[in-house]
Amino acid sequence: MIQYPDINPVALQIGPIKIFWYGIMYLIGFAGAWLLGVYRAYSKGGWTREQVTDLMFYMVLGVVVGGRLGYFVFYNPMFLLTRPSEILQTWHGGMSFHGGLLGVLVGIIIFMFKTKKTFAEIADFVVPLVPVGLGMGRIGNFINGELWGRVTNVPWAMVFPHADNLPRHPSQLYEFLLEGVVLFILVWTFSARKRPPLAVTGLFLLAYGVFRFLIEFVREPDVEIGILAFGWLTMGQLLCAPMIILGGLLLWYAYRGKAIFVKKR
């Protein structure tokens, strides 16, 4: 068993003002995504630095608003009725990737009408940047000691102080590695060459969906929801299933389906 590094979630306090590690991780993620977006714009062309900055503004807004609302709608709906003020307390943690994804979708649509770029062009440009924010968010979860894994006896198990005294999977680190590092390498490398429209987006949806679906088997289900069906299905897996299907369909359409539709015309 490995000792959990019990880190103070407050990185810096100046009088009544507290700066939380959770927020810092998100800032690092957003900044990293912007820098990579600028590099991507210069290397591939067709984008200006100002457009990247505008797009990131909509993405950040979509992630924060959609992620926060999604957390309460998907995982803690009673809080909306009993403790609505919790929605504004983002430093306590509690962000839903799937809610953030819906928020990003709205942001892409707004940016699409503003710039006249196609949905596929925007989506394929931005999804290789997403794993950077995902990875930093998972580090924030780990520092907060939240979203821990299920009880296990693996040598790298940890005891999380906010859970109990039982050794558990450090599932936040699994998600950091798969949803952050591996997903970034996979999608960034794939997008380095010219691909058919929506192929990069399809790969991202498929890969994230598979990674998250698998990790859910060792991640502790949310107390408010638990197991949904079959003795193993969690809310995370239920939300990832459409992503896997849609990602596969987009890849098929990008490489085979589109040609079939064009021939039929």
Image: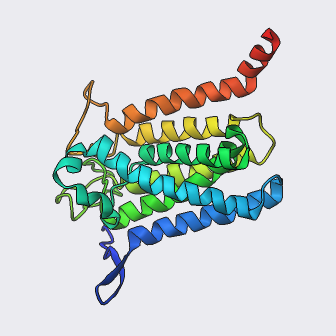
- The percent position of residue 28, horizontal first and vertical second, equals 53, 69
Residue 239 image point, x, y percent: 40, 35
In the depicted view, which residue is nearer to us: 171 or 221? 221
In the rendered image, the quadrant that contains the C terminus is top right
- Asked if 124 appears above or below 39 in the picture, the reply is above
* Residue shown at the point (58%, 60%) measured from the top left: 57
Is residue 131 shown above or below 239? Answer: below
Q: Residue shown at 61%/65% (left/top)? A: 32
Above/below status of 57 relative to 175: below
Up the image or down, 142 lies above or below 190; here it is below
- Estimate the x, y position of residue 246 in percent, counting from the top left: 55, 28
Looking at the rendered image, the quarter that the N terminus falls into is bottom left
Q: Position of residue 64 (x, y in %)?
A: 44, 57
Instruction: Specify the quadrant of the image occupied by residue 20.
Output: bottom left
Residue 90 found in image quarter: bottom left
Pick the residue in front: 241 or 145: 241
Residue toward you, 117 or 149: 117
Q: Is residue 2 visible?
A: no
Q: How many numbered circles are shown?
A: 0
Residue at x 31% of width, y 35% of height: 234
Q: Is residue 63 visible?
A: yes
Which residue ends up furthest to the front in the rendered image?
114
